[in-house]
């Protein structure tokens, strides 16, 4: 594990630098917000478009892959929901906790890091994982919370979901990249270089932004946060590994990427959703802090395991 740890440490060191800059107020919350916007709308979108445009759909989509990931996520999602309900929390809070248990920081941490650590071949499976997280599970929590508050599912809810997906630059950049790829027209050299140059800013920018945003998070309800971190860092990759390697027998390299992606710490967009709906934001904040800190070791272990396939 030591060689893998030495490779992952620089990525987490960048998060640490961002955290320090946020804590000492060298990077204010407003500065962090603008850096996050730059990464989200420009650098990361350029990286995703370039990956998708230079890959075929067959290199990204695989039915066994999708089914295995959905099964692994669904099992942990159901378990987290059940445990939350047994604690007698509301359905809305249970949905937020379940989201913490299965949604990792694929966009800002996973794709930039795993493409470097696992090689360019990791891009396709990572894009598929990110698409499922955004389309399936981000929609699911919105449907649950909105349905509980309104008492029914209206056409307006689904319209808002569709518009939200269409306005998400990560979804848009992947779709446009795949459309370009399916046209059979090679990406022109200057455009490819431009995308590579802009996309290169995604890794340091995203990691710094993660750290700076963590500096504003508070740690409360530690026992629940510890349980949700255990779900995300241990149970989630274990369930996905079982589904990918035993149930559906996904191709080993793609399965390894999927399992590694499942071991990522809780994504920051879960906090944004929790804050937007006013449902347990402090609980999510604590879970993000704990899972990100512990993932330095857990991700190292998972990567060491999947690279032995």
Image (cartoon, rainbow, N blue to C red):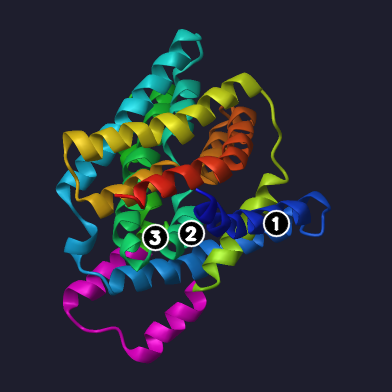
Mark 3: secondary structure = loop
Q: Position of residue 263 (x, y in %)?
A: 44, 41
Q: Nearer the viewer, residue 223 or 86?
A: 223
Q: CA distance from mark 1 to mark 2?
A: 16 Å
Q: CA distance from mark 1 to mark 3?
A: 24 Å
Sequence-first tag of 3 and 2: 2
**Hey, which residue is sitting farthest front in the picture?**
2
Asked whether residue 63 is in view, the answer is yes
Sequence-first tag of 1 and 3: 1
Magenta part of the protein: which range?
A: 173-199
Examine the image and state in which quarter residue 282 appears. Answer: top right
Q: Position of residue 23 (x, y in %)?
A: 79, 49
Residue at 52%, 56% in the rendered image: 3
Q: Position of residue 281 (x, y in %)?
A: 61, 32
- Residue under label 3, please give it: 118
- Residue under label 1, please give it: 18
Q: Position of residue 37 (x, y in %)?
A: 58, 62
Q: Main secondary structure of the magenta part?
A: helix
- Residue under label 2, please give it: 113
Query: Callout 2 environment at 10 Å: few (<14), some (14 to 19), or many (20+)?
Result: many
Asked whether residue 272 is in view, the answer is no
């Amino acid at each position: 594990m030591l060689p893998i740890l030495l490779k992952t440490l620089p990525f987490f060191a960048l998060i640490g630098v961002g955290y320090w800059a946020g804590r000492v107020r060298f990077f204010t919350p407003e500065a962090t917000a603008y850096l996050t916007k730059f990464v989200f709308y420009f650098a990361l979108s350029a990286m995703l478009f370039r990956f998708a445009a230079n890959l075929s759909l067959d290199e990204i989509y695989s039915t066994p892959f999708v089914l295995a990931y959905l099964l692994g996520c669904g099992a942990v999602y159901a378990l987290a929901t059940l445990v939350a309900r047994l604690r007698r929390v509301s359905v809305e809070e249970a949905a937020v906790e379940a989201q913490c248990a299965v949604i990792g920081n694929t966009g800002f941490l996973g794709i930039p890091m795993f493409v470097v650590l696992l090689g360019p071949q990791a891009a396709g499976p990572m894009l598929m994982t990110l698409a499922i997280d955004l389309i399936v599970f981000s929609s699911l929590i919105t449907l649950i919370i909105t349905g509980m508050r309104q008492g029914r599912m209206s056409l307006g809810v689904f319209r808002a979901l569709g518009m939200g997906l269409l306005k998400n630059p990560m979804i848009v950049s992947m779709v446009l990249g795949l459309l370009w790829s399916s046209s059979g027209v090679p990406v022109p050299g200057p455009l490819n270089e431009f995308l590579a140059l802009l996309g290169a800013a995604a890794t340091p920018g995203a990691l710094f932004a993660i750290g700076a945003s963590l500096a504003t998070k508070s740690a409360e309800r530690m026992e629940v946060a510890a349980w949700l971190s255990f779900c995300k860092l241990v149970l989630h990759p274990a369930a996905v590994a079982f589904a990918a390697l035993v149930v559906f027998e996904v191709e080993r390299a793609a399965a390894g990427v999927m399992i590694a992606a499942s071991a990522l710490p809780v994504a920051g967009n879960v906090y944004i959703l929790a804050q937007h709906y006013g449902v347990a934001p402090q609980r999510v904040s604590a879970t993000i802090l704990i899972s990100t800190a512990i993932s330095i070791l857990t991700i190292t272990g998972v990567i060491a395991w999947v690279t032995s396939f």
